[in-house]
Amino acid sequence: MATVKVGNGAGVTTYDEKEEDKVRPEDLSELLGAGTKEIHDKAENNQFVKDFLRGRLRKELFKLGAVALYFTYTAMEEEIEKNKDHPHFAALYFPTELHRHDALARDLEYFYGPDWQSVVSCSPATQHYVDRIHEVGQSDPVLLVAHSYTRYMGDLSGGQVLKKVAQRALKLPATGEGLEFYTFEGIHSAKAFKQLYRSRMNELDLDAATKEKIVQEAVHAFLFNIEVFEELEEIGKTLKDEVMDAGMPVHGEMDGDINKCPYYTAKMAASGGSAYACQMAMSVLRHPTGQVLLAAWVAALAGLAAWYLM
């Protein structure tokens, strides 16, 4: 049994990791995986993501990505708080473990200084995302399931690898300043917590039509993230290149298992060869600052890919 401590009034919850194999085709987590496959592939092939794989990314875009995340999570967590007792969401309310608003605020203070709130603003693409989150929170709260699962589960998956990439590329302090977004102090086992979360989600009393609505909302979440990717890509065209040398995390920093990197897993599945791994590593090694934006909004893609990688 895996023991997971939760802060939503449930005390200590135990979850049998063997139950992971007991999912049914009609479970919401399975429906989400199948229903978002096509849009997931589109997101993965976005030029912004390809630029990451080549290491052609910029520090300023990382900061703007963090700003986008701040406004996105502020909206989502406002609506979660309003709907924390909703029968179709209450079981997924884990503010102590998951909420990211305060951590992102500290990251923005690190990058922009104590007056960061007067400096940052919500971009048009992010505003579209924010508006949709508020809309579903006010008119159809069950759809918050799609947004919270997409974001938080991804942050607990590929986001943890991306944290190390960003720390190395930006030469950030080992104490975690600038990367608090990726630090989940209330979660001791990401794997066990994700299993608990999926189990809670699959146990929600939802009919087939409502599950389909949630799947379609998850597709919309992909589209909103793609819009943010494209916006950042356009901004990047106006910025001066930043080029320096630094390395990707070595296997030892991923507990000896490079397959924990979602991008390595996906691309190796597509190419099927060790030659690609060498090619990718050499390319990224040339442009470490490019790795940084990965930690901000490509982490969103890793999050969206959580349907397949968890």
Image (cartoon, rainbow, N blue to C red):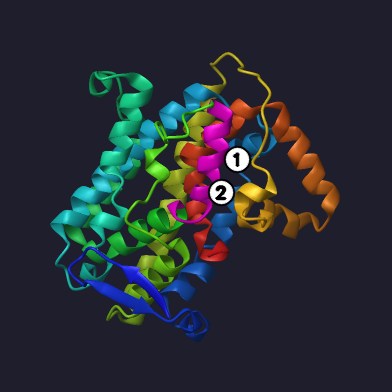
Name the amino acid type tagged 2. Ala
Contact (Cβ within 8 Å) of mark 1 with mark 2: yes
Residue 212 visible here? no
In the displayed structure image, the side of residue 281 where residue 185 appears, left or right = left
Which portion, as a residue range, is magenta? 155-170
Residue in the picture at 25% in, 71% down: 91
Relative image position of residue 98 (x, y in whole percent): 31, 54
* Residue 165 forms part of the magenta stretch: yes
Relative image position of residue 133 (x, y in whole percent): 28, 50
Tell me if mark 1 has few (under 14), some (14-19) or many (20+) residues whose alpha carbon lies within 10 angstroms of its own.
many
In the displayed structure image, the side of residue 46 where residue 131 appears, left or right = left
Q: Quadrant location of residue 266?
A: bottom right
Q: Is residue 182 above or below residue 293?
A: below
Name the amino acid type tagged 1. Val
The majority secondary structure of the magenta stretch comes to helix
Relative image position of residue 218 (x, y in whole percent): 41, 59
Residue located beneath label 2 in the image: 43
**Callout 1 secondary element:** helix
Residue in the picture at 21% in, 72% down: 10
* Residue 257 forms part of the magenta stretch: no
Q: Earlier in the sequence, mark 1 or mark 2?
A: 2
Mark seen at residue 49: 1
